[in-house]
Image (cartoon, grey):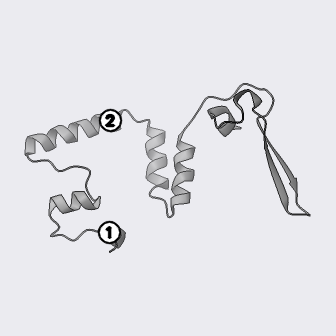
Amino acid sequence: TPSRRSEGRPPRDLPAAEALRAGWLDRVCSSVAEASTAARRSAQRLSAVPAALLETCRSRLPAATVDAALVVMGSLHCSPPRARRERLVRLYLDSRARVAVVQLADAARSNCLSADLATD
C-alpha cells in the first residue's frame, strides 16, 4: 500500500504514533515542557543558518522531483575554490558522431572519487 505521505496531507484523526511511523512527524513529545525544549532547540539551530541559505531553501524547496532536489542540495554546498592546476576530469565530445568520452586524470589517487575530482 502507498504511504500516507504520498497522498498529500495526513488525515486529521491520524494518531501521533502512526504519523511518526509514516514519516509525517520527526518526533512526538509527551509533555508541554518537552515540546517547548524541542521548539527552543529547533529555533536555535535555525538562527545559526545563514539568511541566504534559508531564502534559497524557501524559494527552491520542496522540489518537484528527486533530481531537482539533488540539484538544489548540491547548490547549497559552497566549497572554497580549487587552486589552479591541471584538470582532473576531461571531456571529449564529437557532436556529429554523438559520442562523448569522460577521462579521469587523477593518477595520484587511482581516479578514486575525491572532493577535487568531483569538483572538477
Residue plotted at (82% across, 51% down): 101
* Residue at x 75% of width, y 32% of height: 106
The residue under label 2 is 45
> In terms of depth relative to the viewer, which is nearer, 103 or 72?
103
Q: Give me the disc on residue 3.
A: 1
Q: Is residue 68 left or right of residue 6?
A: right
Q: Picture coordinates of residue 47 (x, y %)?
A: 34, 35
Disc 2 crowd rating (10 Å Cα; few below 14, some 14-19, many 20+) is few
Q: Position of residue 81 (x, y in %)?
A: 66, 29
Q: Nearer the viewer, residue 59 or 91?
A: 91
SS at badge 1: loop
Residue type for callout 2: Arg
Give SS at disc 2.
helix
The spot of residue 29 in percent (x, y) is 14, 47
**Counting other residues with Cα less than 10 Å from the Cα at mark 1, is it few (<14), some (14-19), or many (20 or more)?**
few
Q: Quadrant of the N terminus?
A: bottom left
